[in-house]
Image: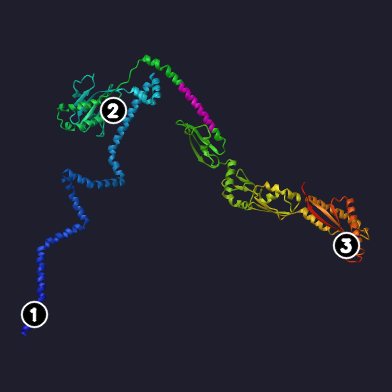
């Protein structure tokens, strides 16, 4: 029992021992590695925190840049930062341009002011010289020279008047004011004390800057002493002073600045090491001698000049003046012709007509419905480069143009005439009925039109009735150029119809099949009436007493029918048929029937009936006495007359 309990205790103590051992291990690990864990956590926080990383780099970068030494290291740094810095500058300029304007303003503005002042001074000097010489006799020669060479007259004057000579050049040390080197032209007396001159110039510079200049950047650049002018140019270590006699052009400054820059570039070592001895600087004399420029005008014999340039220039002046006057007269004629040509067009209004800088300037208004004034210019004698035009489109109220515009807006048919009286639009002519109805809708949108009168407008059927003089018995149907006539009309009107329709050019096709002829209808009625007429006999060929009046009516009926046939250009044939009853023999009845017909024919001839008559006979087949068969009947045939 005791052994078993010992084993149980041993088994229960095993996990406890393991836990104690593990805890002891953790305590030992903490004691040995706690500092390393802390550092690892700091490094992890450092790399996971961009702000802390950037802060460390910001603290280290300036020191690293200052410690950078060596060409390769500087080149690598420049290559690494070039694109980034450049992009930042560009972005900054675009985002805040005012910042850079404020920064550059103190530097650029004095440079601009100085450049403008020098240019203006040079122009004034040139102008003064030109005015002084402008009234001399030399002006004729200079005009001739300008004409021959093609140069401007002002440039010729300057070439003949601006003369100068750079007599001496001083190179002065900028810090000490000591004379570095001095050169002069041949024939110029050497200065007794050139150092005193350099000291004087330095003192004048300091005096003017201290007394008059509010800006320390302003420097004295010109000194005028009698007929002499001194140009001063400054470099980093030396100042160049050039003494000039005459009127120097300010373009010399660029030349002097270039020479001073070359001296600094070539002899920077000598200038920086100068300690009062100017003998080592003797090599600079060759550069200073480049400043000793001169420009002289040629002096001619006055007698030769007077003989050469008095008569010839006067002749040239008269010739030039004559040519100018003639050319001006021709231009004036061309101008007048063009203006007169413009005034012929209604709808063109000229608002300005004058000369500006040698050109004829014409401004005005034109209506687009007329010819463009620039196209009219091509038909004139003026050249395109002689005229400067400015035309603005507008709507003219000239009646003819306004009517044309209204015709376009209304899309008026060709036979509609538009007349504009003040603000009333009057329409006359012929139009489609639907177009006339639309006028009430269109009228309110017409600019400048307060009322529209179209009661004089006719529809196409009305106009056709009027032009064709259509009878009341004829109906007119017209649509989209197609004409159809229906009804009955006289032959004379019908025959003239084709010519009348041909004059109406808006009719493209027509149909007359349903148009009947009045005479034809009347003749048909008379023919039917004539064929119903019968003349009765007693016995043999003796007429009944009551037939005399019928014969007179018969004659009138035949003549009227024949008259209608002639109007219809047809020949009338009257068939007169004798009838008998069935009594007696056939031979007897045939002869009797012909005798009865012959008697009627003779009567009609006596009455001057102008018709062709044909005799015929007809016998009754019934053999009995029938007084109704003792008669003469009539039939009519019409044939078209043959044209001779």
Q: Is residue 306 left or right of residue 641?
A: left
Q: Can residue 398 be seen in this view?
A: yes
- Residue annotated with mark 2: 252
Residue 323, given in percent of the width and then of the height, sits at 47, 24
For label 1, the SS is helix
**Residue visible at 29% across and 42% down?**
100
In the image, farthest residue toward the bottom: 1
For label 3, the SS is strand
Q: Which of 204 and 596 is in front in this view?
A: 596
Residue 12, given in percent of the width and then of the height, sits at 10, 78
- Residue annotated with mark 1: 9
Position of 350 relative to 501 (above/below): above
Residue 181, given in percent of the width and then of the height, sits at 19, 26
- Residue annotated with mark 3: 619
N-terminal-most mark, 3 or 2: 2
Q: Is residue 322 left or right of residue 111?
A: right
């Amino acid at each position: 029992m005791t052994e078993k309990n010992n084993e149980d205790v041993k088994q229960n103590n095993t996990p406890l021992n393991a836990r104690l051992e593990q805890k002891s291990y953790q305590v030992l690990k903490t004691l040995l590695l706690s500092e390393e864990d802390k550092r690892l956590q700091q490094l992890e926080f450092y790399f996971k925190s961009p702000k802390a990383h950037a802060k460390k780099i910001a603290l280290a970068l300036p020191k690293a840049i200052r410690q950078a030494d060596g060409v390769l290291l500087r080149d690598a740094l420049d290559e690494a930062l070039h694109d980034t810095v450049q992009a930042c500058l560009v972005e900054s300029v675009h985002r805040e341009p005012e910042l850079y304007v404020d920064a550059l303003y103190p530097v650029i503005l004095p440079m601009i002011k100085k450049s403008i002042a020098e240019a203006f001074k040079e122009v004034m000097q040139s102008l003064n010289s030109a005015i002084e010489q402008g009234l001399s006799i030399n002006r004729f020669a200079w005009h001739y020279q300008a004409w021959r060479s093609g140069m401007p007259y002002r440039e010729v004057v300057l070439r003949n008047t601006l003369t100068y000579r750079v007599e001496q050049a001083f190179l002065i040390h900028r810090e000490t004011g000591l004379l570095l080197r001095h050169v002069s032209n041949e024939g110029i007396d050497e200065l007794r004390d050139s150092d005193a001159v350099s000291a004087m110039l330095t003192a004048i510079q300091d005096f003017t800057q201290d007394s008059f200049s509010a800006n320390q950047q302003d420097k004295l650049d010109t000194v005028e002493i009698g007929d002499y002018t001194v140009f001063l140019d400054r470099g980093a270590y030396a100042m160049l002073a050039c003494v000039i006699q005459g009127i120097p052009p300010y373009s010399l400054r660029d030349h002097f600045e270039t020479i001073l820059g070359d001296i600094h570039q070539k002899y920077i070592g000598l200038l920086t090491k100068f300690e009062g001895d100017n003998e080592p600087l003797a090599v600079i004399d060759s550069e200073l001698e480049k400043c000793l420029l001169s420009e002289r005008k040629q002096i001619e014999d006055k007698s030769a000049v007077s003989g050469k340039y008095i008569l010839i220039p006067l002749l040239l002046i008269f010739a030039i003046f004559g040519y100018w006057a003639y050319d001006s007269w021709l231009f004036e004629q061309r101008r007048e012709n063009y203006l007169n040509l413009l005034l012929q067009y209604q709808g063109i209004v000229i608002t300005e007509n004058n000369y500006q800088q040698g050109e004829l300037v014409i401004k005005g208004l034109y209506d687009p419905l007329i010819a463009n004034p620039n196209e009219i210019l091509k038909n004139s004698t003026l050249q395109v480069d002689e005229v400067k035009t400015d035309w603005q489109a507008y709507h003219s109220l000239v009646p003819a143009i306004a009517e044309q515009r209204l015709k376009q807006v209304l899309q008026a048919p060709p036979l509609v005439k538009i007349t504009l009286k003040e603000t009333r639009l009057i329409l006359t002519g012929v139009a489609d009925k639907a177009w006339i109805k639309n006028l009430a809708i269109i009228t309110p949108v017409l600019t400048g039109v307060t009322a529209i009168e179209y009661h004089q407008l006719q529809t196409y059927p009305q106009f056709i009735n009027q032009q064709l003089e259509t009878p009341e018995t004829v109906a007119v149907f017209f649509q989209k150029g197609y004409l159809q006539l229906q009804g009955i009309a006289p032959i004379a009107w019908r025959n003239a119809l084709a010519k009348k329709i041909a004059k109406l050019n808006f009719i493209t096709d027509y149909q007359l099949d349903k148009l009947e002829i009045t005479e034809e209808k009347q003749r048909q009625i008379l023919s039917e009436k004539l064929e119903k007429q019968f003349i009765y006999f007693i016995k043999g060929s003796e007429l009944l007493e009551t037939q005399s009046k019928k014969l007179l009516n018969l004659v009138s009926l035949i003549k009227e029918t024949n008259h209608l046939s002639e109007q219809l250009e047809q020949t009338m044939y009257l068939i007169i048929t004798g009838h008998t009853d069935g009594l007696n023999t056939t031979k007897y009845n045939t002869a009797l029937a012909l005798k009865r017909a012959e008697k009627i024919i003779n009567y009609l001839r006596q009455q001057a009936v102008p018709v062709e008559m044909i005799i015929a006979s007809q016998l009754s087949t019934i053999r009995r006495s029938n007084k109704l068969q003792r008669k003469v009947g009539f039939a009519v045939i019409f044939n078209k007359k043959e044209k001779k």
